[in-house]
Amino acid sequence: MPRFFRPTQNHLLIWRLIRESFRQHAVGYGIAIVAMLVVAGMTAASALVMKYITDEFVVSKDINRVYLIAAAVAGIFILKGIATFVQAFFLSRVGNSIIADRQRKIYDRILAQGISFYHSIPSSDLITRVTHNAQAARVVLDVIVTSFVRDLFSLIGLVAVMIYQQPVLSLVAFIVGPIAIFGVNQILRRVRKIMEAEFMSLAQIVQVMQETTIGVRIVKSFNLEQVMRSRMHRAVSDVERRANSIAALEAGTSPIMETLAGLAIAGVVLVSGYLVVQGGQTPGSIMSFITALLLAYEPAKRLARFRVSLEAGLVGVRMMFELTDRPLTLEEKPGAEALVPGPGKIELQHVSFSYADGEPVLRDLDLTFPPGKMTALVGPSGSGKSTIMNLIMRMYDPNSGQVLFDGQDIAHATLHSVRDRIAYVSQDTFLFTGTIMHNIRLGRDGASDEEVIDAAKAANAHDFIMALKGGYETQVGENGALLSGGQKQRLSIARAILRDANVLLLDEATSALDAESEALFRAALEKLSSGRTTIAIAHRLSTVHQADNIVVMQDGKAVQQGRHVDLIETEGLYRRLYEFQLMD
Ligand SMILES: Nc1ncnc2c1ncn2[C@@H]1O[C@H](COP(=O)(O)OP(=O)(O)OP(=O)(O)O)[C@@H](O)[C@H]1O
């Protein structure tokens, strides 16, 4: 069986889409469908009335009847016009609402996913899906409704008129129908493949665009314009080529239909001419029949193309369901309860973890982070420091063992309550598009302007903010592009101060700041960490002297623990790392 013919799969997809959408938009669809039925009825009536126009004018020559027929014709077309408007209006409204619903659903599902999901699909792919797949859902529903209601019922009405007027002639016209449908179906073979490839190229365009904007400094300084330009041109040409292929396929249905329709109409003209000239039939019935036949052509053509249009849209719908049906990579346990607030003691008990099967990153790790104290995590690159933070924030669950907050296993707590306890300052300070005020306030939704300003003061950010022309209302640009590295870091500290959580996770920046920025940053950090359970990944050992405890990681194990003064006295990894950095 050819690949395109997958009836059950397509039927299931369509059925699910209809079930999910029609229930929600029953009223809108109901009105549009009634209007479509009126359009179909009026189309058939306009063919039917041709008989009276011809026969009354030519045969009876009664002027009163002419008035009546003229009024009927006007009535038919006015009603058809109104119904066409109502149908188009409601279908568009429902369609727009479906796009909006789907976009919300897709986004909400993506947002609910654990972090490993984000590592498994390129962001450009996700971005493209939010727009493209939601649009596809609307296209499919539009095609189904207009084909199955307006076109199908118009066709049924017109065929009824044809059979009623001329049963024999109708037979001549109907022979070509099945031939046309067969011809068009041949085209379906390639549509799905091309649409899938087109989606990949669209995502590619978004990806190149993203990398160009995010990495613009690298692109410029490494003279990568030509490389990026060729990547973009290739992706754009791919989309163009595929759009042309689809257009050619869709247009390809026309010659088949036109040729067959021409033959059918010629046959009908021949037979009807014979019936009128030789058989003595009235021309009115033949006129009505021919009008119905001509009017039937457009809906018949659209119905013949139905599967081509449907298949093109279904590619996006299939991708959408595939995305929204993916199980969440990290979920709350059924009956999860909020953590009971406590002093902020964090423990890892027998924790083992790997990102990929067979590649252990943490091995049976036991660690305690005492409440209100500062613990520094040090160790070579790849030793598992960031992974410990990931587990404490419950970005992942350990393969075995437990992470406890004040004695409670966070795997059984609500995600929100775990993260509510934590303020996280990452090394790549991320700022959202918007003002400085907006960015700090993200630390605690609903904080007053005064609270934001107090946090900024505590983070040693207030002075530089006030020196900016717009003050707190200054736009930071995309990812804080308009601010310096040191300024961004102090804003992220202000955000964490505002959060006022009792656990502070600090992934220290590797890039060195100038002496003044560094001093301001350190002072802000000290204020932030005092009295909080602080876990800091320290890349530079010069910054850990003050820590209450230092955990030295190596290959997923804690190989040494203690204060700086003690560790430096002991032969071991810490001393070697320290001496190495001093030499550096
Ligand atoms: N998302 C991920 N998927 C797969 N492997 C990962 C992922 N993140 C980290 N790893 C691997 O896990 C190991 C530990 O990484 P981790 O980031 O915890 O180290 P680290 O001590 O914080 O290193 P660094 O000091 O360089 O930041 C490394 O071998 C790394 O390649």
Image: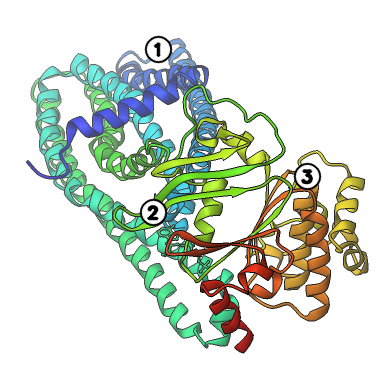
On screen, 233 above or below 189? below
SS type, badge 2 = loop
Q: Is mark 3 within 8 Å of ligand 1?
A: no
Residue at horizontal 72 percent and vertical 52 percent from the top: 373
Judging by the rendered image, the residue that carries numbered circle 3 is: 500
SS type, badge 3 = loop
Q: Is residue 230 left or right of residue 176?
A: right
**Relative depth, front residue between 226 and 80:** 226
* Mark 3 surroundings within 10 Å by alpha-carbon count, few (fewer than 14), some (14 through 19), many (20 or more): some
* Label disc, if present, on residue 105 of the rendered structure: none
**Relative depth, front residue between 260 and 185:** 185
Judging by the rendered image, the residue that carries numbered circle 2 is: 355
Judging by the rendered image, the residue that carries numbered circle 1 is: 62
Q: Are marks 2 and 1 in contact (CB under 8 Å)?
A: no
Q: Are marks 3 and 2 in contact (CB under 8 Å)?
A: no
Give coordinates of residue 439: x percent, y percent.
76, 54
Q: Amino acid at mark 3?
A: Asp
| Label 3 to label 2: alpha-carbon separation | 31 Å
Give coordinates of residue 553: x percent, y percent.
51, 63
Q: Amino acid at mark 2?
A: Tyr
Residue at horizontal 43 percent and vertical 21 percent from the top: 22
Sequence-first disc among 1 and 3:
1
On screen, 390 above or below 231? above
Residue at horizontal 63 percent and vertical 74 percent from the top: 568
